[in-house]
Image (cartoon, grey):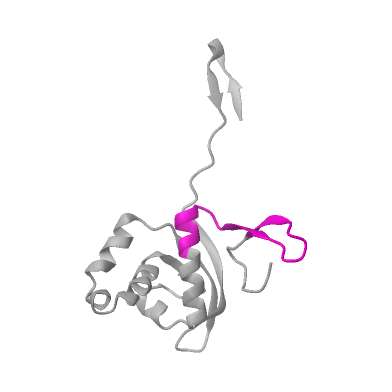
Amino acid sequence: MRREGPGGAVASAPAEPLRTEFEFELPRGYVDESGTVHRRGAMRLATARDELVPLRDVRVRENPAYLSVVLLGRVVTRLGTLPSVHDGTVENMFASDLAFLQDFYRQINAEGHTRAAVACPHCSESFEVELAGSRLGES
């Protein structure tokens, strides 16, 4: 919203603060060593350092597919009641949860939000869906 201030100067309404952390809900959930299932968590925006540091990791050099595990271990800030999340947590997730987090990472870091434009398969009407915190198969 723009307003004209004293002397004809144009003032803008305060910009919304940059959102750097996004909540999610895993489709299956991470099962810890005691059998507790953790589904709700948060992921922060990645920095250049987050994307560069894993490239020096020996596991990533030996197996480039491990890059996403190390990277997600750096940017997932919270998962259920776990005291911390790290690459060891990520590598023990179900494949569907890993795929969900990889897609979620791409969405918030490339698009800057967690909404996706979709079209109804029946009527072709376009609308947006919120990906954060939703489970697969739900709208």
Q: Position of residue 108 (x, y in %)?
A: 49, 58
Answer with left or right where residue 69 lies relative to residue 58. Answer: right
Q: Position of residue 38 (x, y in %)?
A: 53, 78
Q: Which residue in the rendered view is the most extreme toward the right?
A: 123
Closest to the observer, 93 or 106: 106
> Which quadrant does the C terminus fall into?
bottom right
Q: How many marks?
A: 0
Residue at 27 percent across and 61 percent down: it is 52
Does 78 sit above or below residue 119? below
Answer with left or right where residue 4 lies relative to residue 87. Answer: right
Answer with left or right where residue 19 lies relative to residue 52. Answer: right
Residue at 73 percent across and 59 percent down: it is 124
Answer with left or right where residue 32 lies relative to residue 114. Answer: left
Q: Is residue 115 magenta?
A: yes
* Residue 10 visible in this rendered orientation of the protein: yes
Q: Position of residue 70 (x, y in %)?
A: 34, 72
Write the start and end of the magenta stretch as one range.
105-129
Q: Which residue in the rendered view is the most extreme toward the top?
A: 7
| Quadrant in the picture for residue 87 | bottom left
Does 96 sit above or below residue 15? below
Does 7 sit above or below residue 60? above
> Which quadrant does the N terminus fall into?
top right
* Residue 81 visible in this rendered orientation of the protein: no
Closest to the observer, 130 or 14: 130
Residue at 48 percent across and 89 percent down: it is 34
Q: Position of residue 116 (x, y in %)?
A: 59, 58
Closest to the observer, 42 or 65: 65
Q: Is residue 54 magenta?
A: no
